[in-house]
Image (cartoon, coloured by chain):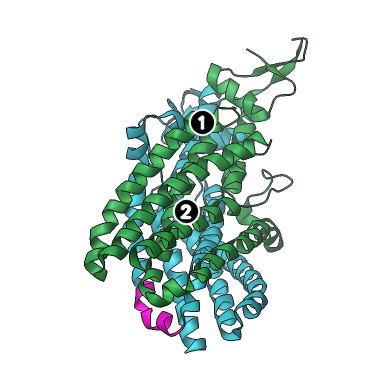
Chain colours: A green, B cyan
């Protein structure tokens, strides 16, 4: 077992894990031995990939040398420079969610209780989405996989999760707010949000990987906002259909 | 350099990284050599900690052997069993956010535009919070650190991030919705959400670690909902103060 000199460092470390190697031999295109990646370097690669995933999933920009200094101890200017960019992009993207809700102003005017469930819906869409992203990032790793079978499975997972959570909220909302149609609209929106968030949470990291980026970028603000916006659209569509 | 036989496996792997060791000697309480952790085991520990962090941050339950099978390829029942529990807890906790919004029904009735900014606010609180959690999880690692200086720094980071993002939204909201006080209320809520989310995003993982749990549990639904609820309370307080 050997790796080629042009392979990704994560692939090298994963090869060592898979085959239980202490060091990984590196060969060139003619399969001539160039040298070996020693165990200390493998450990550093694994730790670095760990940190990169954590930071990318949270939308924290890369440092020149993530390993040299803990982010917890980094100076204030450094922290802001690494944390603000994704937040600004997310903030701009989140204006889409604002426009969606504003677009349904008349629905809200007709029944203000529709607004009560917006934070919980956005929360649950984000939670299901970040599970899907995390599973995708961990599962895709440095491998290239066919997307279609994975998507079907994630679609099934997301819709069953949405169905379970929707079933849970139905009776309590009906009982507390005394509106069966509103309860049904929320339940259907949770079902829709689960399906949509799971599928986008897998498809975006896969797409980023296909384009040659780190799949963890798929968890960025665009992905979350997309899930929020789609979930809100489903919710307001249900409300408009069932309540008005 | 050696580790004691009762130390956490992550601490062992971090010791190997810090001192550039191929294998880590293990000693008992009398400093007698018991053996060594070989490089393949160190690599497996690092990879497993990586996976555990990704899954815990996303609220995915632990498998008996996370390493044996990729979550992407796990059977459907398995996926549901590992992903539903945290989502159900989160769904129950998110009813708190619903009750907060419902508690301000009269505010919404008086000015329905207040509802427009709820999804974006919940989004930005969550995004800042998950950055703080990720930094905390990566920074705390297996170490025990004094919380007070870290909290002050995160407080400064969070409030400066909130200030920057709040400043960005002020003029556009004023311009698009033609309401200076509403724009100010949203901007102040973003400032408050940034501060609160950054501080809780650090404090909760630290607290979980102190209680002997994995700090990544601090990112669970309770933490996110807490950030959502606090941000909503700040927002409605600002709206009540400035608009009514």
Query: What secondary structure is the stretch in magenta mostly built from?
Result: helix
Q: Report whether A93 appears left or right of A107.
A: right
**Callout in the foreground (1, 2):** 1
Query: Image quadrant of residue A157?
Result: top left
Q: Residue at x 36, y 33 (%)?
A: B76
Q: Position of residue B30 (x, y in %)?
A: 43, 32
- Which mark sits nearer the N-terminus, 1 or 2? 2
Q: Position of residue B15 (x, y in %)?
A: 56, 36
Q: Position of residue B19 (x, y in %)?
A: 63, 34
| Chain assignment, label 1 | A
Give the answer, above or below, for where A154 lies relative to B131.
above
Residue situated in front as seen by the camera: A224 or A56: A224
Q: Residue at x 62, y 76 (%)?
A: B173
Q: Which residue is mark 1?
A: A148
Looking at the rendering, the stretch of residues picked out in magenta corresponds to B100-111
Q: Residue at x 77, y 14 (%)?
A: A29
Judge whether residue B18 can be spotted in this image: no
Q: Report whether B228 appears left or right of B40.
A: left
Judge whether residue B232 can be spotted in this image: yes
What label does residue A129 carry, if any? none
The CA distance from mark 1 to mark 2 is 23 Å
Query: Do the residues marked 1 and 2 share a common chain?
Result: yes
Give the answer, above or below, for where B78 lies relative to A3.
below
Q: Which residue is mark 2?
A: A126
SS at badge 1: helix
Residue situated in front as seen by the camera: B242 or A32: B242
């Amino acid at each position: 077992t050997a790796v080629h000199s042009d392979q990704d460092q994560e692939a090298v470390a994963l090869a060592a894990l898979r085959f239980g190697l202490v060091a990984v031999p590196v060969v060139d295109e003619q399969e001539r031995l160039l040298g070996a990646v020693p165990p200390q370097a493998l450990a550093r690669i694994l730790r670095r990939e760990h940190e990169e995933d954590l930071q990318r999933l949270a939308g924290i920009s890369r440092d020149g040398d993530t390993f040299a200094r803990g982010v917890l101890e980094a100076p204030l200017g450094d922290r802001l420079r690494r944390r603000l960019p994704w937040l600004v992009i997310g903030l701009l993207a989140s204006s889409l969610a604002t426009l969606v809700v504003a677009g349904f102003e008349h629905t809200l005017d007709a029944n203000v209780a529709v607004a009560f469930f917006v934070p919980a819906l956005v929360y649950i869409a984000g939670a299901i989405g970040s599970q899907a992203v995390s599973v995708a990032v961990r599962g895709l790793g440095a491998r290239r996989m066919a997307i279609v079978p994975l998507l079907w499975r994630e679609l099934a997972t997301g819709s069953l999760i949405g169905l379970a959570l929707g079933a849970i909220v139905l009776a309590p909302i009906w009982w507390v707010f005394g509106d069966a149609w509103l309860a049904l609209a929320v339940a259907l929106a949770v079902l829709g949000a689960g399906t949509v968030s799971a599928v986008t949470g897998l498809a975006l990291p896969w797409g980023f990987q296909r384009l040659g980026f780190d799949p963890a970028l798929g968890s960025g603000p665009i992905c979350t906002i997309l899930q929020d916006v789609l979930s809100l659209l489903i919710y307001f569509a249900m409300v408009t259909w069932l309540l008005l």
